[in-house]
Image (cartoon, coloured by chain):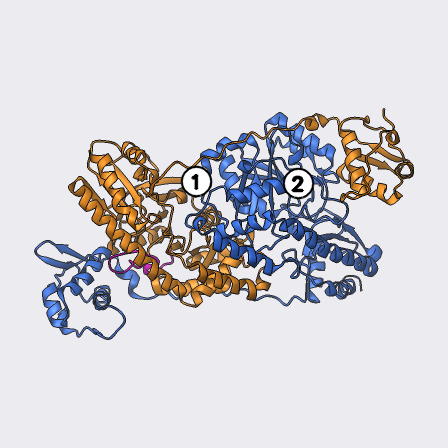
Chain colours: A blue, B orange
């Protein structure tokens, strides 16, 4: 046993660290290293104070901290004792962090993945202006998490915008704001969990949505896509009363659900007292004609949960998505909304509300549509010129990608790899399928053109044609 | 039947709306109003173009939009026909939105709820500076959702900070960033769902965390709190291998789990190959001595998932939380991370990384701690002065609230209501319990002092004493 006062504690009276913490640290280390046995009485506070030439209060503070953390026990009028630390084996060595190296990016010269937007499409100076306004003028809104449903003024702007541009009928009370579509779907799973245990999902479809329902132990039933929208027959055969669709701009095929099928789907769900989740992602970005009006706008029975975001129109980095609940779900929402903290930054919510109130969103959409229409047109021209009859272009009028059917006898993995071998990133359609089996005769690949530069398109397509067909 | 050319379509050549859209809108309205029967042939494009004095392309564009949406069908070389819209009943009237009135705020003069931070604690000008830096200099990071785990530089800063200030041992690779603790727990449920179906939860504890596990159909088992932390015996009796705790600053009781219990809990979970979720919320805000080191720092076997945020130190409006996974979960994380889009705004992440790199966080913590220490001290003094022996103050050294045991023969609802009747908002401890039955002899109430002004404390406590004891 080592007598404390003899072990030369290193008290540094010049150090920034308070003296009581130095005593605490050293005594703790000794206890950990088992220089004391458990139950052993420690020297008195008075004695330690004297030996170290510090005040009794200083030593008391150190002891109080050690006692609070459970290293020592005090017995009234007797003194302090080392606590029982029989489990202490744990601390004797330090765990080396088993580092997982971050993946290094592979060299991609032409990136046709679907993750990026155009670098010129966003006016940062303008967004800074509204951010600074919000940070200056909305101070008193930032001291709590904000309204669980989202800032009222943003919801009000959203209701107005969605009505005007997407034909959605709703009031601010029906809107819930969240940091991304997945967050809103998590909440929806919470709201619906008692009544819904399976969900139909377009095949192929929005994989990130599917994952959420799977995480919530819902059974995901893939439903085939027909030319005019998903198969109602399969929906019926499976007896489903919940379905996730993107009717106005099917992701990733770009197909549009016809008005007849919309009506039939609404009638089907009305009969079963079911619900339709309408993902209206990217519907603003249509390069021929005008955007297809939403399904929600046709719904007279309140069957549609409408989901959308501005990720591709503003910046993916800004995390504000929204969902519109039908009136019949509002009592449930009111009951459960206080179980969820708002996830979207209040600063970004109020910045966006100010941006929308000044009609900047409409301007931004026009600007964005123009940029992508040019890329879309050039890409289609180049594909036609370089590949001609050897491909078929599907779903070319919307969003930030085209879908190609490549007439060759390779499978989609092979042609994605062939592209990668010359520095071009494209994605197999399989990535969006629940059931990864290829169900088409020829490989299908998704080419996103959001992030690629206009001048890169021609050389990239030329390279692709060479590696695929020569 | 009405012949189209005779019904005087209103084409306004001066209007901002393109002519093809005017034709589209009017023809669509006629189809909806059943001015045509389904299957009926429409007049030819040429004829309509002539009668309206517009180009054939204009009419073609209108027809193409209608065809895409499914209102009309084309038959090659024959013409256009009205589609079958037998389900059309839906659109005939407009659903009145069943508005749910937003709740009006009740009149609260002294708000001791636990939702707010101090209005003076945050330096907005400083945050604006870093936000503007990020928006100016990090442009090219905002064109996608960002790294699913969170921006690397932020995770790097977090690893450094957590090691220095909380004794957490980790590398950036172990950290996942998300828009709030609930979002991270949702992800965790997704990662753990195969192996864990029930979870022990401190009673009372962090209700918002509990809701997430319940939404994921996990069985939540309330575990009693003892003086030195949660009951290991109950954990053992239930055979639990997953537990959610806040050992360094138990929410809302403020209790500290002793080193012995920490060791015993680690040993217990090591034996069962279990996991501990350590919620380290607000541990920086301790007004006596230094913050209690984290449990994660003691863990040699990699059993602890560490969760935290800066909601109360910075602004609740900024939605950046973090979790540190033990090395053994990293292969699972790598496998599943691409199923989740990042939820925290990349702009806020990079702003925070810059803020931390300049050591502003440490300054902010010192500043914040000073502000709340003053409020804490004044509140304790006033409670002592006005209520004396009629209350017992529990959990007074940490966080932004105190816990009061009120020696009276009323229940907690009654005294919360009594407070409300004089404009004072306090919360019953029951709100944090899974099992809402009162299990203490005297009512327990939580008084948050984050948002209240220093000068409000004395008059509020005086009023409270009057309404509770007179």
Question: Quick one: B470 or B413, which is closer to the camera?
Answer: B470
Q: Say whether residue B104 is visible.
A: yes
Q: Which residue is mark 1?
A: A339
Q: Is residue B302 magenta?
A: yes
Q: Is residue A224 above or below residue B450?
A: above
Q: Residue at x 26, y 43 (%)?
A: B459
Q: Quadrant of the C terminus of chain B?
A: top left
A264 lies left or right of B275: right
In percent of width and height, residue A349 lies at 52, 49
Q: Single out the mark in the foreground, 2 or 1.
A: 2
B245 lies left or right of B349: left
**For residue B84, which quarter of the picture?**
top right
What residue span does the magenta drawing correspond to? B284-303
In percent of width and height, residue A92 lies at 29, 65
Q: Residue at x 19, y 46 (%)?
A: B384
Q: CA distance from mark 2 to mark 1?
A: 32 Å
Q: Which of the two labelled residues, at mark 2 and mark 1, occupies the earlier sequence position?
A: 2
Q: Quadrant of the N terminus of chain B?
A: top right
- Image mark 1: chain: A
Q: Is residue B443 magenta?
A: no
Question: Quick one: B234 or B230, which is closer to the camera?
Answer: B230
Callout 2 crowding tier (Cα within 10 Å): few <14, some 14–19, many ≥20: few
In percent of width and height, residue B78 lies at 91, 35
Q: Helix, strand, or loop for circle 1? A: helix
Callout 1 crowding tier (Cα within 10 Å): few <14, some 14–19, many ≥20: some
- Image mark 2: chain: A
Q: Which residue is mark 2?
A: A164
Question: Quick one: B227 or A350, which is closer to the camera?
Answer: A350
**For residue A155, which quarter of the picture?**
top right
Q: Is residue A143 above or below residue A101?
A: above
Question: Quick one: B208 or A26, which is closer to the camera?
Answer: B208
């Amino acid at each position: 046993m080592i007598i404390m006062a003899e072990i030369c504690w290193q008290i540094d009276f010049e150090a920034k660290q308070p003296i009581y913490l130095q005593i605490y640290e050293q005594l703790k280390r000794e206890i950990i290293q088992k220089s004391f046995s458990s139950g052993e009485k420690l020297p008195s506070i008075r004695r330690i104070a004297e030996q170290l030439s510090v005040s009794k209060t200083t030593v008391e503070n150190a002891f109080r901290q050690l006692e609070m953390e459970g290293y020592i026990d005090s017995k009234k009028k007797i003194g302090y004792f080392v606590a029982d630390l029989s489990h202490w084996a744990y601390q004797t060595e330090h765990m080396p962090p088993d580092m997982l190296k971050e993946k290094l990016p592979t060299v991609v010269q032409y990136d046709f993945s679907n993750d990026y937007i155009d670098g010129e499409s966003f006016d940062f100076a303008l967004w800074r202006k509204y951010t600074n306004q919000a940070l200056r003028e909305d101070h008193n809104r930032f001291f709590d998490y904000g309204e669980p449903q989202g800032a009222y003024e943003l919801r009000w702007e959203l209701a107005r915008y969605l009505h005007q541009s997407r034909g959605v009928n709703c009031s601010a009370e029906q809107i819930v704001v969240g940091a991304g579509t997945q967050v809103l779907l998590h909440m929806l799973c919470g709201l619906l969990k008692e009544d819904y245990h399976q969900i139909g999902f377009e095949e192929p479809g929005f994989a990130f949505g599917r994952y959420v329902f799977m995480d919530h132990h819902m059974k995901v039933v893939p439903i085939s896509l027909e030319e005019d929208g998903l198969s109602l027959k399969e929906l019926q055969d499976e007896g489903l009363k919940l379905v996730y669709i993107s009717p106005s701009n099917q992701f990733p095929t770009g197909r549009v659900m016809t008005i007849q099928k919309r009506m039939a789907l609404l009638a089907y769900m009305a009969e079963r007292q079911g619900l339709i989740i309408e993902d209206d992602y990217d519907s603003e970005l249509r390069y021929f004609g005008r955007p297809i009006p939403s399904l929600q706008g046709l719904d007279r029975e309140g069957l549609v949960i409408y989901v959308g975001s501005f990720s591709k129109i503003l910046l993916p980095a800004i995390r504000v998505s929204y969902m519109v609940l039908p009136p019949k779900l509002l009592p449930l929402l009111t009951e459960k909304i206080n179980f969820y903290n708002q996830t979207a930054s209040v600063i970004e919510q109020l910045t966006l509300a100010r941006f929308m109130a000044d009609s900047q969103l409409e301007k931004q959409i026009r600007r964005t549509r123009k940029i992508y229409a040019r890329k879309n047109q050039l890409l289609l021209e180049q594909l036609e010129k370089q590949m001609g009859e050897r491909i078929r272009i599907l779903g070319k009028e919307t969003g930030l990608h085209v879908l190609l059917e490549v007439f060759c006898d390779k499978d989609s993995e092979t042609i994605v790899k062939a592209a990668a071998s010359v520095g071009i990133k494209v994605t197999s359609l399989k990535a969006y399928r629940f059931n990864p089996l290829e169900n088409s005769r020829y490989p299908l690949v998704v080419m996103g053109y959001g992030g690629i530069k206009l001048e890169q398109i021609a050389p990239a397509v030329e390279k692709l044609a060479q590696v695929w067909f020569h």
